Amino acid sequence: MLIVVTAFKLIAEIALLALCGQWLLGCLCGAGRNGNPFYALLRLLGRPWIRVARWLSPRMVLDRHLPLVAFFFLLIVWGVASMAKVGICLRIGVDLCK
């Protein structure tokens, strides 16, 4: 069970960092961000989570706000996975969680 929780936490961390990096690089590059290969890679990593956000959110949410919805959804997933990991580690012992 610890491996499953750790995998969920890792996937959420990677997606969160991809969305943060995409936002930061978009701010730094401005209008030229679509030609940037790193921005394209980060957009590729974040695209599945933005699709999940579109599926979860009501239709009145604008498409430009979907990355923010995806970010907060992943933040909740990361928090739940972190709390589950701490609970498992306290139950089985901290030495076995390393």
Image: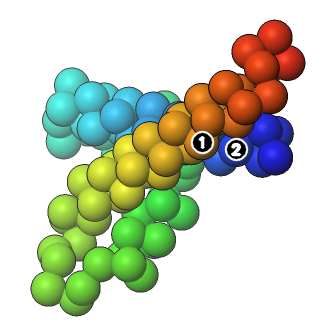
**Residue indicated by mark 1:** 84
Locate the C terminus by quadrant: top right
Separation (CA) of disc 1 from disc 2:
7 Å
Circle 2 packing at 10 Å, graded few (<14), some (14-19), many (20+), is some
Q: Picture coordinates of residue 74 (x, y %)?
A: 43, 50
Query: Relative to the observer, which residue lies in front, 97 or 8?
Result: 97
Closer to the chain start, of discs 1 and 2, is 2
Q: Picture coordinates of residue 44 (x, y %)?
A: 54, 51
The residue depicted at 61 percent of the width and 35 percent of the height is 87
Query: Relative to the observer, which residue lies in front, 21 or 75?
Result: 75
Query: Relative to the observer, which residue lies in front, 81 or 64?
Result: 81
Circle 1 packing at 10 Å, graded few (<14), some (14-19), many (20+), is some
Q: Picture coordinates of residue 41 (x, y %)?
A: 54, 41
The answer to whether the residue labelled 1 contacts the one labelled 2, judged by CB atoms less than 8 Å apart, is yes
- Left or right: 20 with respect to 58? right
User: What label sits on residue 5 in the rendered view?
Assistant: 2
Q: Does residue 28 sit above or below 64 in this rendering?
A: above
- Left or right: 14 with respect to 72? right
- Left or right: 11 with respect to 6? left
Query: Relative to the observer, which residue lies in front, 25 or 48?
Result: 48
Secondary structure category for the residue under label 1 = helix
User: What label sits on residue 36 in the rendered view?
Assistant: none
Q: Can you see residue 17?
A: yes
* Amino acid type, label 1: Ala
The residue depicted at 27 percent of the width and 29 percent of the height is 24
- Left or right: 41 with respect to 21? right
The residue depicted at 29 percent of the width and 78 percent of the height is 57
